Amino acid sequence: MQTYLDCFPCFVRQALDAARFATDDEQVHVRVVQEVLHLAARMDTHQPPPVIGQHVHRLIRNITEKEDPYYEQKHRSNELALRLYGELEQDVAGAADPLEAAVRLAIAGNILDFGVNSALDYAQAEQIINAALDAEFDGSELSAFSDAVAQARDILYLGDNAGEVVFDRVLLERLPYDKVTFVVKGSPVINDATMADAEAAGLTDLVEVITNGSDGPGTILETCSPQFRERFGQADLIIAKGQGNYESLSEVQKSIFFILKAKCPVIARDLGCTIGEMILRRNAKFGIGFIAEDEETTHARF
């Protein structure tokens, strides 16, 4: 997915948020915004938004001299999500269709975006969870998702934000553990989950967890480690959470199921949905350019 003009105000807003998380010095805030505007003006808009975001947040970390401006927000979001975990388990266990309920809750975690919404409290989180369980949801891809999981031998689950990974755990518990590897960022960027967040959420006790070796929001394959790119190429199925992963992988010829809420008009337009819609959708590029490696296995070119 390319970067649109509507994305640029978000880059500036996010940069200012990160600068304010990192320091109270208003002069630093001014410098961050000015430098980000200068950087954004030079970027290639044919690239997906996470590519520009990666450069923006590297710049912010350099100016503020903070390796992880969102550290406190991520810690708080993990704590709040873990308080909700028991309730999430009960919601799934009591559902008529536990898999659908788990997918809905995974999307609820994406809706909450704890690290950005610093004012969010327990009661508000519960309201959002209940709304996600009751909201209209196009489950037409649910059967295909279930079949793809059953047929896959190697599944990569690409995580999104801290806090949200606790909601991912509820879905992971409905998947075959031995076939799933959960993926976090190689180093901090925005409030995206790293290995420390996966450990806090208990994911490392449940499935294999690896990093993608990158500091990019989403999954920018060319900046990921060779080890991750090899795993990505070998995987039969990718489960990708959040807008950043959709933005960076929607053009990749691979079996990918995107799970997210369409939070902005740019994403909604690209997906052909309404703003706020909960999405479980297979990559439109699936099946294009696949070649047989042997009689039993196929891998995508990417």
Image: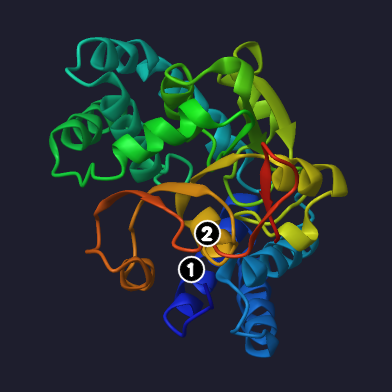
Element carrying mark 2: helix
Above or below for 78 versus 257: above
Element carrying mark 1: helix
**Residue drawn at point x = 52 percent, y = 18 percent:** 176
- Viewer-nearest residue: 144 or 278: 144
Gap in angstroms between the C-alphas marked 1 and 2:
6 Å
**Residue drawn at point x = 32 percent, y = 18 percent:** 88
Residues tagged 1 and 2 counted as in contact (Cβ below 8 A):
yes
Expressed as whole percent of the image width and height from the top left, the position of residue 59 reads 74, 67
189 left or right, relative to 136: right
Expressed as whole percent of the image width and height from the top left, the position of residue 1 reads 52, 72
- Viewer-nearest residue: 105 or 24: 105
Above or below for 265 versus 58: below
**Residue drawn at point x = 51 percent, y = 26 percent:** 78
Q: Name the residue under label 2.
A: 17
Task: Give the amino acid at mark 2.
Answer: Asp
Q: Residues within 10 Å of mark 1 (few under 14, many from 20)?
A: few
Above or below for 288 versus 5: above
Q: Mark 1 points at which residue?
A: 13
**Residue drawn at point x = 50 percent, y = 79 percent:** 8
